[in-house]
Amino acid sequence: MSTNSTQNERVVSGMRPTGRLHLGHYHGVIKNWVEMQLNYECFFFVADWHALTTHYEDPSRTPDHVEEMVIDWLAAGISPSSATIFLQSMVPEHAELHLLLSMITPLGWLERVPTYKDQQEKLREKDLATYGFLGYPLLQSADILMYKADFVPVGEDQISHIELTREVARRFNYLYGREPDFEKRAEEAVAKMGKKNAKAYRNYRKAYQEQGDSEALTVAQALLNSQQNISLGDKERLFGYLEGISKIILPEPQARLTPASKMPGLDGQKMSKSYGNTIALREEPDDVVQKLRKMPTDPARVRRTDPGDPAKCPVWQLHEVYSNDSTKEWVIEGCKSAGIGCLDCKQPVIDGVLAELAPMRARGLEFEKDRQLVRDIITDGSEAARNVARETLDDVVEAMRFSR
Ligand code: TRP
Ligand code: SF4
């Protein structure tokens, strides 16, 4: 167990319920989550409402998909004692925050998110000219801001959603992060610093706000940090006053780009359910072996005696994931000289995949046998998430001067 100082930094990430996960998900996303849960306070959730934005016509399979996916998470090593695992729709506060954020989000910001038009094009057979679909990234913003996340591990395709989230947070803080008599209180706090410091602070603030002088901002922040005689509340006011905001209610999260998964599918294309080239995390070992044995190889190797070229072979890409240098040398040498057969060549990969999947399968079987436990994990996690969510919503509602 790591005793990192980042333990109190928050990570939030979600996944739409697609049902069973495969090795592409594992190498692309889940392995990363498993590592992060040791070093951060993590919230991992199933985004079932997001699934509804594109699959509203037939949501009937969603509950199954949710359960199967959470079993895969648990099988892969996500642990309810290290991370909060929950279901989005069991934390209805997400809907409330989404609604409130929708009031301040300009339509153009949503229309300009690149995934909006892209996905509509891609999923032409579906009518995605809906209100819910346009709001997809804003619902995601609510998911993230709800937990005041520091980091959001996402793939490249989601960067624009994090960017939107940051803009919405900034706008929210700008609009509502203000005490009623903020300016007056801030000015009083400036005066408390003493003549000389007050003058310096005003000059730096002016330089930053009028000329965008970021060095002045840094110097002014250092000046504030060194003040001994003003209260914490006043200090916070002065930090906010510097930047033109008074109080940060929804902090801006940062994207943590997940490196693109190098996990190829059985045909050498990216592993994806839609290509039918996957190995599931809880796949039967016999099926894993069969699938790998049947994998296509360099088409030039028609006969065992024909030499081949690993660069033209999808099996080689699997060696890149699973094999050490000496095995890789053995492959290159043996393939190019026809010294080894393709089945020989596949064996280390087969062994590597089986070894990787074995503990996941074992853990998965335990959870398959005890589905009530899985449901309890989801319910308990959702309850825990809800407690955090309620706190944020209280802050939000208070800042908007709503009473509930
Ligand atoms: N849109 C994300 C995806 O398709 C899923 C998601 C929903 C998400 N809410 C989120 C990811 C919040 C990170 C944070 O992958
Ligand atoms: Fe591919 Fe290995 Fe056969 Fe060469 S020997 S074609 S790398 S499976």
Image (cartoon, rainbow, N blue to C red):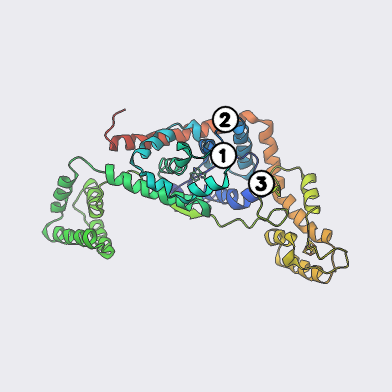
Q: Position of residue 171 (x, y in %)?
A: 32, 46
Secondary structure at numbered mark 3: helix
Q: Give the Cα separation between the discs numbered 1 and 3.
A: 16 Å
Secondary structure at numbered mark 1: loop
- Vertical side of 315 occupied by 26: above or below: above
For label 2, count other residues whose C-alpha is less than 10 Å away and answer few (under 14), some (14-19) or many (20+). few
Which mark is drawn over residue 126? 1
Looking at the image, is mark 3 or mark 2 earlier in the sequence? 3
Asked if residue 151 shows in the view, the reply is no
Asked whether mark 3 and ligand 1 are closer than 8 Å, the reply comes as no
Which mark is drawn over residue 376? 2
Residue 195 or 314: which is nearer the viewer?
Answer: 314
* Residue that mark 3 sits on: 274
Asked if residue 404 shows in the view, the reply is yes
Residue for point 59% across, 31% down: 58
Position of residue 323 in the picture relative to residue 156 (left or right): right
Residue 262 or 139: which is nearer the viewer?
Answer: 139
Q: Position of residue 221 (x, y in %)?
A: 26, 58
Label pair 1/3, CB-CB below 8 angstroms: no
Asked whether mark 2 and ligand 1 are closer than 8 Å, the reply comes as no
Q: Give the Cα separation between the discs numbered 3 and 2.
A: 32 Å
Callout 1 amino acid? Lys
Foreground: disc 3 or disc 2? 3
Callout 2 amino acid? Asp
Looking at the image, is mark 1 or mark 3 earlier in the sequence? 1
